[in-house]
Image: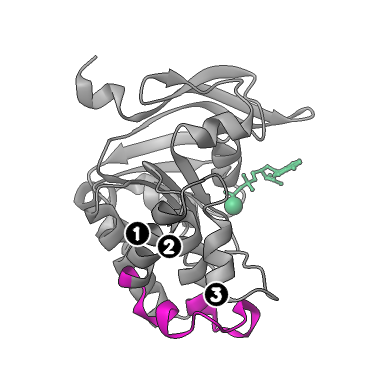
Amino acid sequence: MSKDESNALVVEGVCTAYDKANVLENVSLTAAPGKITCLLGSNGSGKTTLIRSILGLTLPNKGSIRFRGVNLTGLPTHRVIAIGIACIPEGRRVFAKFTVEENLRMGAYQESSNAEVAERLARVYETFPRLAERRTQLAGTMSGGEQAMISIGRGLMRAPKLLLIDEPSLGLAPILVQENFNLIRHINEQGITVFLVEQNVHQTLAISDYGYVLSKGRVVAEGKPQELGKTKEVHDAYFG
Ligand SMILES: Nc1ncnc2c1ncn2[C@@H]1O[C@H](COP(=O)(O)OP(=O)(O)O)[C@@H](O)[C@H]1O
Ligand SMILES: [Mg+2]
């Protein structure tokens, strides 16, 4: 295994079920370090279930998941997160009755050094000047796009090495989707590995380095964005 591979997120032969309903069937994929890797799939294809499997929230009944050479399979969620993984969940929940800054600070709950928290906060405000302007506003009164920024900013407060993002474009106006994806690219350029699961094919492929297609719990295609966008599998996954 090359050094690069050992720093990757590697999912190998993962099968995950809820009770008796099999959802993921033999899923294998790699999110290369420093890159944006996407997993495209329509509603119900199993995208969130894969994120839950990576985080140790739902235990796969087969296969393995490794990150930076550590086998995550079977580890409790807090141990998975401690390795340097943060997740921006579907629906970008914010604490509505807390201010923007309080929401961000909650992302750094494990960090004991005040100086380190202050530095991370400054970095998030640099990425999202809009949040800096609104730091004392209650998060619940912000627009959908701004709440998306809070949610991503909160993930960044953990200074993760790997960011898992679950459908960031869901429910956002088209212009905000583009803005949001530009921000994800910007975050990736700071050296954070991104694993992005999405239904939005074209804008997701436009920012990704590599992509996979999930259909009914199986990976049915993979490749570089330019090639993947043209495949029958992408088309079928949505319209088949
Ligand atoms: N907690 C759960 N219990 C039982 N079935 C679930 C649960 N969560 C999701 N599922 C089922 O698993 C399948 C995949 O869901 P999900 O991973 O949420 O897909 P996606 O994120 O791609 O929309 C769906 O058929 C869904 O109904
Ligand atoms: Mg989902």
| Cα–Cα span, label 2 and label 3 | 28 Å
Magenta stretch, main secondary structure, is helix
Residues tagged 1 and 3 counted as in contact (Cβ below 8 A): no
**What amino acid is found at the position of numbered circle 3 in the picture?**
Val
For residue 6, above or below residue 195? above
- Residue type of the residue flagged with mark 2: Asn
Task: Identify whether 76 is placed above or below 153.
Answer: above
Q: Is residue 139 magenta?
A: yes
Asked whether mark 1 and ligand 1 are closer than 8 Å, the reply comes as no
Residue at image x 33%, y 63%?
A: 123
x, y percentage for residue 239?
48, 57
Sequence-wise first label, 2 or 3: 3
In the rendered image, the vertical position of residue 165 relative to residue 14, given as above or below: below
Q: Residues within 10 Å of mark 2 (few under 14, many from 20)?
A: some
Task: Name the residue beneath numbered marker 1.
Answer: 204
Residue bounds of the magenta highlight = 126-146
Q: CA distance from mark 1 to mark 2?
A: 6 Å
The answer to which quarter of the image holds residue 32 is top left
Amino acid on which disc 1 is placed: Thr
Residue 177 percent across, percent down from the top left:
41, 73
**Would you place residue 155 above or below residue 46 in this image?**
below
Which of discs 1 and 3 lies nearer the camera? The answer is: 3
**Splitting the image into four quadrants, where does ligand 1 fall?**
top right
Would you say 131 lies left or right of 37 here? right
- Is disc 3 surrounded by few (<14), some (14 to 19) or many (20+) residues within 10 Å? many
Q: Which residue is mark 3?
A: 100
Q: Mark 1 near mark 2, Cβ–Cβ under 8 Å?
A: yes
Name which residue lies at 36% across and 26% down. Answer: 68
Please give the label number shown on residue 200: 2
**Residue sitting farthest toward the top:** 1
Label 1, residues with CA under 10 Å away: few <14, some 14-19, many ≥20: many
Q: Dot 3 lies on which element?
A: helix
